Image (cartoon, grey):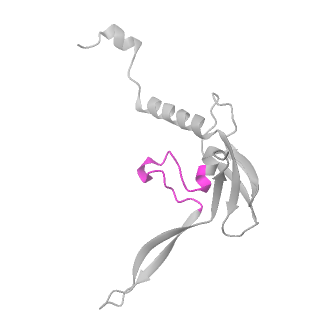
Amino acid sequence: MTASPKMRAQNPPKSYKELKNEELLRCMKEECVPVKGIFKNYECEGATLALTQRKYPYHPELNRNPIFKEVLQDGAEHEIPLWVARWLNGKDITAKELNGKLGSCSYPKYAYDIPEGTATPVVIPGRRKQRFGFQSLEFTA
């Protein structure tokens, strides 16, 4: 059974742009929630990090400033938006192609191997070295 023209006029199908805007708004609502936790600087213990980040555009429905600007002290407790905490840990829910693993705040460490009979070294991708992190206090009792 097909819908009548009158019913189609009342509920037109959503465009790709409208669907993406709804998904973006859903992600913004989920990730702009503040979380408490401890900032970790793995490169230089006790150092600070002056962080200025922007992920989402301003949206009047949320009525929030999308720019995060704060100085984070290693080992100190901070209250930051969830998306900043995820970024510090190298994760992003909007990166579906990468399964949410961005690798931000880290760098790759490579190993080299020279196969027998050749003089050309081969690069072997290794683990990633984490520079910064954020440990949440939301789940502690």
* First to last magenta residue range: 86-105
Q: Against 123, is 119 above or below?
A: below
Q: Position of residue 134 (x, y in %)?
A: 65, 55
Q: Is residue 94 magenta?
A: yes
Q: Against 121, is 128 above or below?
A: above
Picture mark count: 0
Q: Is residue 14 magenta?
A: no
Q: Is residue 26 left or right of residue 49?
A: left
Q: Residue at x 46, y 35 (%)?
A: 20
Q: Residue furthest left?
A: 1
Q: Position of residue 45 (x, y in %)?
A: 73, 68
Quadrant location of the C terminus in the rendered image: top right
- Rendering quarter of residue 139: top right
Quadrant location of the N terminus in the rendered image: top left
Q: Position of residue 105 (x, y in %)?
A: 60, 61
Q: Position of residue 52 (x, y in %)?
A: 70, 52
- Rendering quarter of residue 12: top left
Observer-nearest of 55 and 26: 26
Q: Main secondary structure of the magenta part?
A: loop
Q: Against 95, is 47 above or below?
A: below
Q: Residue furthest front?
A: 141
Observer-nearest of 66 and 72: 72
Q: Is residue 128 left or right of residue 7?
A: right
Q: Residue at x 53, y 60 (%)?
A: 103
Q: Residue at x 45, y 31 (%)?
A: 19
Q: Is residue 90 left or right of residue 97?
A: right
